[in-house]
Image: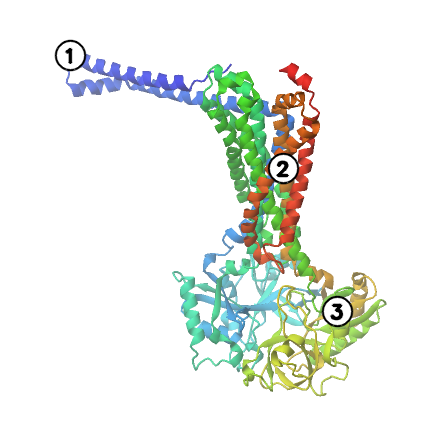
Amino acid sequence: MRLNLWPWRQHREEELDEELRTHFRMAVQDRIERGETREEAEAAVRREFGNVVMVKEVTRAMWGWVWLEQLMQDLRYGLRFLHRSPGFTFVAVLTLALGIGASTAIFSAVNPILFEPLPYPHAERVLMIWDFGQDGSRLYTTFGTYREIVERNRSFDAIAVMRPWQPTMTGPAERLDGQRVSASYFRVLGVPPVLGRDFDPSEDELNGPKVAIISEGLWRRRFGGESTIIGRQITLDDNPYTVIGVMPGAFENLLSPTAQLWTPLQYDKSLPPESREWGHHLRMVGRLRPGVGIDQAKQELNTIAHNAVMEFSRPPYAALESGLIVYSLQDDMTSGVKPALLAVLGAVMLVLLMACVNVTNLLLARGAQRRGEFAMRAAIGATRARLIRQLLTESLLLAMIGGALGLLVAAFGVEALVALSPEGLPRAGAIGVDGNVFVFAFCIATLVGLLVGLIPALYVSRADLHAGLQQSSRRTAGGHQLTRRILVIAEVALALVLLVSAGLLLRSMQRLFAVDPGLDTSHLLTMQVQTSGRRFDKETTQRFFEQSLEAVRQVPGVTAAAFTSQLPLSGEIEDGYGVHFESSPTGNPEADNSAFRYAVSPGYFETMAIPLRRGRLLNEHDVSGAPPVVLISESLAKSKFPGGQDPIGQRLRIGPNDGPWFTVVGVVGNVKQTSLVMSQSDAVYITNTQWQLFADKARWLAVRSRGDAATLAPAIRQAIWSVDKDQPVVRVSTMDELLAASAAERRFALILFETFGIVALVLAATGIYGVLSGSVTERTREIGVRLALGATRRNILALVFRQGMTLTGLGIALGLGGAVAASQAIITLLYGISPLDPIAYLGVVALLVGVSVIACWMPAWRAARVDPSITLRAE
């Protein structure tokens, strides 16, 4: 028996205080009677009573030790209770571990991407700046726009532009991912090199010195981490570059995560408006001055865009008059994945809530079995506060053990998340179990422990503890049963929300992959081939690709092959140019929209299985020196020549106004360039040899095979290297893989929602089973009486089934409203279906009903087998 010392402690402290005050007054009065003044007497008595006051403080400290001892008793008792109930402990801990582990794993991904500041000094001041497209979309900016904004703005400390760069480093030959940047790039990000120095503005001039800054990883991998790297020359694309700096190992280049080296842009600042540098191909980033807000910067940039000045000439297609788009770097970086991550975070919170509900139900059921224990403890002096504290201690112990196991679940979950995450997920390298994740798991475990123990504890505080000695099931279990049924209804409702979301995403994926990409993706292998070095001029580049194509076509198993400047669904930066028709319907060729420019080799359409709608395809006669010809996509033909007008024979220009006129000789089917979700994209197709502005040094090879295309990759590489062994062949994949990757974000959300939905379904079924099983146990006497009075076993089965299906029905009715609301949170992830898709809703309802029937069967079968004679004799 353990005594409750709290009332006695309070009473003894009050007695101690009153006793001290009485002695103090008596001692002061005695000194006054002996001739001392009151002030002298009180001062003397205070000095004498110093030891007594110290004794009082020691006594109070003893009460603290008593409280600590009581806490240790609660912990020891809680551990013994969990040890005596291994089945209950296992189920409760496993349920909490799954809930806490899943939520911790998702938090470890969401926190660095959405909530933590970016790893730059004053990251909130770093902004992305985009041009406005004619359809309201974001466009890459031009070098001329960048120069004008740099000169005219007063809101930014520094502005930089960048574009991808993929040079080949010799010794041994290796293709590297890099960036060509303006000199202020690292100043904008606020991260200088850890070795050496940053770029100087004088190095970002036309024909300036060839210098480079490399990443810490490249420095250690290729140069052994030698400090003498500064000032050393490396060869990139057959040109010597001097290494002037090494970036820190912790540097996260969020604008190009795979970049390993950087070199100045070195564009001509006196460029004419029709030059290539005016193309929309640069990304612009700026750092605000201290004290300048984003709204202020937006206003100034739009003022600059809408008010041209003579010093900065603009070509008609610069699109500045439409304004500029400005986002913080974090918002810009996460805009594509934020809806999916927030939806997944909401889903895992529902799973955690279901785990809490399930464990609360278990504790309530366990509490019903411990009524006699609670009543006995109350009879020997335990207060309600002490019982509540004991129950909360037990629930906290469960939660802490579940949280510890949850961290192991989270560690495996993080690995699975990184493996399943879509390519290009921002800050993927920062996802992991770190200190913040430990703190989150501890806080969640504590909160869960209090939450799951609160309802059972409050029930104990309100119940008639002494009535528990009677062990009358109906009088003492009714409150538990009502509460547990309410919690099961909540579980079913939450499970319905998760399952409907998963069903909608599954239906959306089915619709998405039913979309015609405009080509036949089966038996199609793709890879990127790049020429590098000073020896590759325009003619040499064209000769290399022609010889490589001929070698590839000789590989056994290859039925067709072709090169293209860009590949549909590859995720590469789209190559778009203004397309100006000679007979523009608007009467103003400059107002015509842009289109994707494909420079292809003859045989491209046969290889990709892109259908011809009208006219002819490009062939081997469409070479340099022959009349320039072009094919246009069906969408471009319909938009420019509505009403059935024939585009064949029409002339158009691609890009600069001084370019050649191309004659339309054919119309081909539309192809999904960016993703299956995006609308049809206008496109123009010309042969590589008739594209005169520049030679595409990086081209995609498409190969159609008789059997499994992936097995041909080694032989095709060797065929290309037989022409020139130093040219890199990268990004090898089948077209089916590229098609799947284009929907990776939706697939990522679908897999997680399906996983959470299955967990929710199991938890809901477990909850229904637990409530019905407990109900059958507590209503055994009632069932025996019913059977003795003539009820059949079918009646008993129906009784239990009716109870279980009523809970399911109420949960479904409640969950339907939640599912409708939740579907709005994932609406950006849906394609081709309504958030109220009846097939998804009806399918989930049928699934829940079926699982509920299974969960009801075992308790109902046990109830029907009750022997009324044995039951009544026991009573």
State the residue at coordinates (36%, 17%).
Answer: 11
Inspect the image, locate mark 3, and give the three-letter code of the amino acid beneath it.
Ala
Q: Is residue 718 left or right of residue 648?
A: right
Q: Quadrant of residue 824?
A: bottom right
| For the residues bearing labels 3 and 1, Cβ distance under 8 angstroms | no
The residue singled out by tag 1 in the image is 33
User: To which quarter of the image does residue 864 belong?
Assistant: top right
Q: How would you rate the neighbour count of disc 1 (Cα within 10 Å): few for under 14, some for 14-19, many for 20 or more?
A: few
Instruction: Give the residue displayed 18% in from the left and 14% down from the top.
Output: 29
Dot placed on the residue nearer the N-terminal end, 3 or 1: 1
Q: How far, Cα to Cα, is label 3 from label 2?
A: 57 Å
What SS does tag 2 mark? helix
For mark 2, what is the residue? 805
Residue drawn at the location 61% of the way across and 75% of the way down: 595
How many residues crowd around disc 2 within 10 Å: few (fewer than 14), some, or many (20 or more)? Answer: some
Badge number at residue 702: 3
In the drawing, does residue 146 fall left or right of residue 782?
left
Q: CA distance from mark 3 to mark 1?
A: 114 Å
Query: Disc 2 to disc 1, how far (Cα)?
Result: 87 Å
Q: Nearer the viewer, residue 441 or 436?
A: 441
Residue 342, compared with residue 685, is above or below; it is above
Q: Is residue 250 visible?
A: no
| Image location of residue 525, percent across then percent down | 76, 65
Residue 422 image position (x, y, % from top left): 64, 56
SS at mark 1 in the image: helix
Amino acid type, callout 1: Glu
